[in-house]
Image: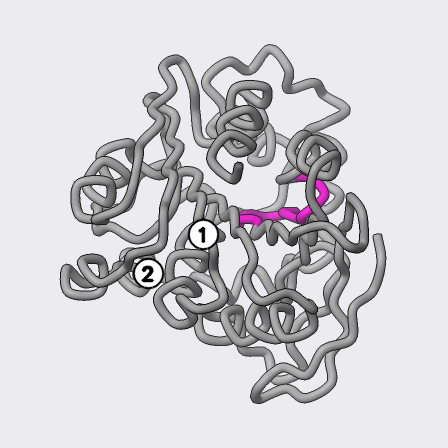
Amino acid sequence: MTALNVVIEGLGQTEIAVQTAGPADGSVVLLIHGSGPGASAAGAWRATLPFLGEHYRVIAPDLLGFGGTAPASDGRHDRERWLAQLLAVLDSVDAPSVQVVGSSLGGGLALHLALRRPDRIGRLALIAPLGSSFSITPGLERVWGYQPSLPAMDALMHTFVHDAAGISDDIVQLRYENSLVAQDVYSRMFPDPRQRWIEDYVVTAEEVAQLATPTLIVHGREDQVVPFVSSFNLFQALPNSRLLGIANCGHWAQIEYADEVNSALRAFFT
């Protein structure tokens, strides 16, 4: 993990924790992780980062209030603040355009980033993204309403995947310990009523129709957090998109089906 010093609108000079991989002179891929207690770039992209790093210069920041990035000094953590952070990261990258991959809430941020700065985004990959309206699921309620305990984290980890065979007690324990680091901040990010935070990421029909950026959407059919139909709706509306639906797969497609998703990302970017 390295530190990146950027100037974020509304915050000024800010240090961001960043995971990196690949050659310094390679074409840039920006990875944006999702929300959830204990979430971080390292956890979300543990299979993606080294694979894409074989071919690209990969930058995966921890969003403000997550992982190794400190909470915003003014306590504000929302879509506009995180977009300002991501725009600051883009400004720090010496590249005319980048490829962007976003997962879950990070997918919603990636979509809004492409709408705001289409000149900076070459291709866009969204994994189980926010962006289309749906009634909040019990799984997403558990994610955003998490109260720290080992049983709650165990239930949450099982919510993220379809096949829980890889969810060991050690993994649950580590994610639980990570969730305690900034739980006071996290507990204020998505207060009730939580449906409004889904709607905050919804893109209008007019916005979607004007987005010409080539877009790949990946979604597990058995996702308990963001329903598959929301990505299908985005796919139907986006004029230059393709949809990869994966059966027997939950919310963490990039982890449960890492080889398939990695291959799809590389083929899409090349």
Q: Is residue 142 left or right of residue 13?
A: left
Residue 193 figure quarter? bottom left
Which residue occupies the extreme right position in the image?
Answer: 2
Amino acid type, residue under disc 2 in the picture: Tyr
Q: Amino acid at mark 1?
A: Leu
Q: What secondary structure predominates along the stretch shown in magenta?
A: loop
C-alpha gap between disc 1 and disc 2: 8 Å
- Inspect this view and state whether residue 175 appears: no
The residue identified by callout 2 is: 201
As rendered, which of 108 and 115 lies closer to the eye? Answer: 115
Residue 12 in percent (x, y) is at 68, 88
Residue 191 sits inside the magenta stretch = no
Identify the residue at horizontal 34%, vertical 39% (top origin): 226
Labels 1 and 2 touching (C-beta < 8 A): yes
Magenta stretch containing residue 36, yes or no?
Answer: yes
**Which quadrant holds residue 9?**
bottom right
Q: Residue at x 77, y 73 (%)?
A: 15
Q: Position of residue 137 (x, y in %)?
A: 30, 39
Between 102 and 72, the residue placed more toward the observer is 102
Q: Residue at left 55%, top 73%?
A: 87
Q: Position of residue 71 (x, y in %)?
A: 67, 71
Give the residue displayed 30% in from the left and 53% down from the top.
131
Q: Which residue is mark 1?
A: 105
**Element on which disc 2 rests:** loop
Q: Position of residue 59 (x, y in %)?
A: 69, 53
- Region of the chain picked out in magenta, as a range: 33-43
Q: Is residue 255 above or below residue 24?
A: above
Residue 161 higher or lower than 30, as above or below: above
Badge 1 element:
helix
